[in-house]
Amino acid sequence: MTAQLIDGNALSQQLRTQVATRAQALKAKGITPGLAVVLVGENPASQVYVRNKVKACLDAGLHSVLEKYDASMTEAALLERVEGMNKDPSIHGILVQLPLPAHIDAQKVIEAISPAKDVDGFHIASAGALMTGMPGFWPCTPYGCMKMLESIGYDLKGKHAVVIGRSNIVGKPMALMLLQKNATVTICHSATPDLKAMTLQADVIVAAVGKRNVLTADMVKPGAVVLDVGMNRNEEGKLCGDVDFDGVKEVASYITPVPGGVGPMTITMLLVNTLEAAESASN
């Protein structure tokens, strides 16, 4: 059996078309959904991400502001700029690109963003809302994973989901989202003694540790659904995920490729969150 691909590019396109339609409806009321993206320093990967986010916004008919600052910007100056954006009615979502320079406390900056504009879903209020099942913004990468499962009509009720990774950005929120859909969830990480014993029980596996080949074919139960959140480079410098794709695709029923899987969904869910922030502000 060769797994069916869950095409993140195609699903993203569908969702972005819906965002564009809803953005048009808001524009008819005189509101253009706006996302502010703040980049501090010259991190090359961050520059690429930021460029992609701004382009995606503009393509979907959203208004985007990109503010770039020197790496020497003080924490106080950044906090002041965030406060200004909190008060700006034309900005519905605020995204401060991570990582920040070492002298700036990233958590302090995230907490300074108004929860109503926290479209990255990283604020402690957003995390608390997810934890307690209240409305709030979900972090974009695990939210994209949930949309991918939805796109194949996968019912998580009673299924065993294994999440490899426990970061605040992917692993933990992913586990909570799966729980909300009535899956039984196991979180594995670097201190898990026998990862294979866990993954072999899983109906759904989400690999999110940033380590190549953390999941191989012998670790996957036949027919499992595998979502690969990893973003790594192989010896030839080619982009690859956390999953040994060629091996695992012969065992799984569905799998996400890298690139073209979860990656495009992350930016798409950022657009969805920004649009929803604008819709909330307009009510």
Image (tube, grey):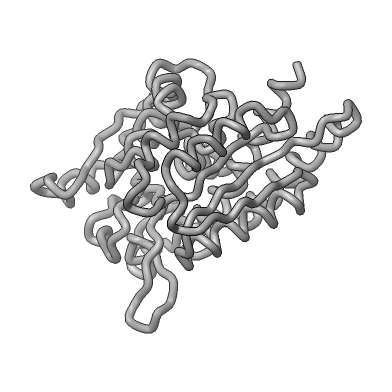
Q: Quadrant of residue 179?
A: top left
Quadrant for the N terminus, please: bottom left
Residue 110 picture location, percent across and down: 44, 35
Q: Nearer the viewer, residue 155 or 55?
A: 55
Residue sitting at x 56%, y 38%: 81
Using the image, determine if residue 3 lies above or below residue 187.
Answer: below
Residue 270 picture location, percent across and down: 59, 42
Q: Quadrant of residue 10?
A: bottom right
Quadrant for the C terminus, please: top right
Left or right: residue 224 compared with residue 135: left
Using the image, determine if residue 18 lies above or below residue 185.
Answer: below
Number of numbered markers? 0
Residue sitting at x 75%, y 40%: 18
Residue sitting at x 28%, y 46%: 165
On the question of residue 149 being in view, the answer is no
Residue sitting at x 41%, y 51%: 100
Left or right: residue 13 compared with residue 48: right
Residue 252 picture location, percent across and down: 38, 55
On the question of residue 60 being in view, the answer is yes
Q: Nearer the viewer, residue 167 or 86?
A: 86
Residue 8 picture location, percent across and down: 57, 54
Left or right: residue 221 compared with residue 30: left
